[in-house]
Image: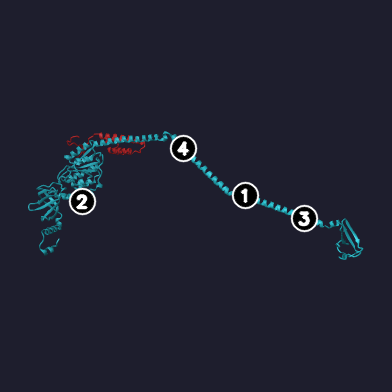
Chain colours: A red, B cyan
Amino acid sequence: MAKEKEAAVLSFEEAMDQLEQLVGKLENGDVPLEKAIDLFQEGMKLSHLCSQKLEQVERKIEILVEENGSLTKKPFSSGIEEG
Amino acid sequence: MPSWSEMKREAILSVKDLNKYIKAVIESEDLLQDVWVRGEISNFTHHSSGHMYFTLKDADSRIKSIMFAKQNQRLPFIPREGTRVIARGNVSVYERDGQYQFYVTEMQPDGIGGLYMAYEQLKKKLEDEGLFALNRKKQIPRFPKAIGIITSPTGAAVRDIIITLQRRFPTIPILLYPVLVQGTQAAPAIVKAIQEMNKRQEVDVLIVGRGGGSLEELWAFNEETVARSIFASQIPIISAVGHETDFTIADFVADLRAATPTAAAELAVPHHMELRQQLAQLKQRLQRGLFQELQAKRDRLERAKRSPYMLNPRKQLIQPAERLDRLTEQLRYRIENSVTRAEQKKSKLVQRLSGFNPKEQVLYTKRRAGNAERQLIQAMQTLLRKHQYRWDTQLKQLDALSPLKVMQRGYSLVYDEKKQNLIKSITQVQLGDVVNITLKDGRMDCHIWAMEENIDG
């Protein structure tokens, strides 16, 4: 999670939401040209960010295991084939 | 229907009336209208109409039973010859055959009857409390950051869930909280897991469930403690218990019910391919949006440039100029017109007014006065001439009568001595008197010497 925070503070959902809103605004028309260009650039950034987040394949499957009365996270694999 | 006393009196009934009466008596018995019966199914027939006909029997007795299609459609199991069941229904009479029958409304395999009734009771209680209310359901996030799974770490369910999650959204972090999913320890473990997950706040969707099983095996998910912990969870919960047909209390309380563990995973995360497509579409719309915006602005500019005012500004002035000329012309014409009319009117008025001009009257009067004056003068002159004439005539006459004239012809005038009285007779004098004789050229005093009176005189 720390690594992602570096790349962008936005979550995928937030970025997607913003992108959708922005596209809606742009499609609605009635936007001053300068604003439209700003929206476009911002949109392209968000789109790129979303793609990146989708590509960041970092499988993390963990299991909570009780050890000495407290729960700790450990990698979990139950012989599941990947993909 | 004839009353009992009537029947008694008449003593003889039709078969139909008898059956009708028996039916009425049975149906008026409350206990027979909602009754649970335990027995074994035999002579089972599932008719093409959908109704089920069978006999419920035990070691000592049997009763003809029927379950109509409408009710048996919701049966949680398939009844077979020899199945031990608990059936709920009412007793009535099939009049045609004079046969009393058990009309089944609900039925379940025997052995779990107590559980089933407990389930029904709890379901009703929680429903009344509002734990199933749709408006209490939490929204499952569109793009969860991490998924929590509460299930057995060894079953098929966990495998199905993880595989499906990974297939759909490979980057999604998964946190598994292993629990027992059956037996007396299951419910407390599930409750603890839900609470722990809420405490940790590492996941934003929880999948709680297990694979299919008998009612007893699924029982933990029908426990009130589990239902209440699901309801209390801040994290949205997708329930995934058993198979399509298994409905547990947990399913009713959960924010979303999945028919199977695989389905739960599908409901939990979007498919990354769909997301990619969505993203691509958004990108396309973004580009098209800007393009259209630019195009629209360009079109507007073009339209503005092509406007006749921009293309030929001078030409745009011609029309107004023409109009101005025309209007000026009209204005002038109208002014002239009205001036002419006013002048005409004025001269007419002047003409009329001049009829009343005092100057004319003065002139007229003057003329009349002149005439009168002339006439007056004329008349005066005529009068004067007439008087002059008369005066002349009179003067001549007077002249002719003047004594002087007479005296010229030789006559004289005799006055008394004092020259006061003219003496016309001798009687006026005596001898010796002095008389004054006036002649034409002087006077003389004379004494009278003699007198003679004219005889004839």
Q: Secondary structure at mark 1?
A: helix
Q: Earlier in the sequence, mark 3 or mark 4?
A: 4
The disc, 1 or 2, on the residue closer to the chain's N-terminal end is 2
Pinpoint the chain carrying mark 3.
B
Q: Mark 2 highlights which residue? A: B125
Image quarter where the N terminus of chain B lies is bottom left
Q: CA distance from mark 4 to mark 2?
A: 91 Å
Q: Mark 2 belongs to which amino acid?
A: Lys
Residues at marks 3 and 4, CA–CA distance in whole angstroms: 99 Å
Mark 3: which secondary structure? helix
What crowding class fits label 2: few (fewer than 14 Cα within 10 Å), some (14-19), or many (20 or more)? few
User: Dot 2 falls on which chain?
Assistant: B
Q: Which residue is mark 4?
A: B322
Find the distance from the CA under tag 2 to the CA under tag 3. 169 Å
Residue B360, disc: 1
The amino acid marked with disc number 3 is Trp
Please, which chain is the residue tagged with disc 4 on? B
Which of labels 2 and 3 is toward the front?
3
Quarter of the figure with the C terminus of chain B? bottom right
Mark 1 belongs to which subunit?
Answer: B
Q: Earlier in the sequence, mark 4 or mark 2?
A: 2
Identify the secondary structure beneath mark 4.
helix
Could you tell me if the residues under marks 3 and 4 are in contact, i.e. CB atoms within 8 Å? no
Q: Please tell me the numbered disc located at residue B391.
A: 3
Report the mark closest to the observer, 4 or 2. 4
Residue for point 10% across, 52% down: B64
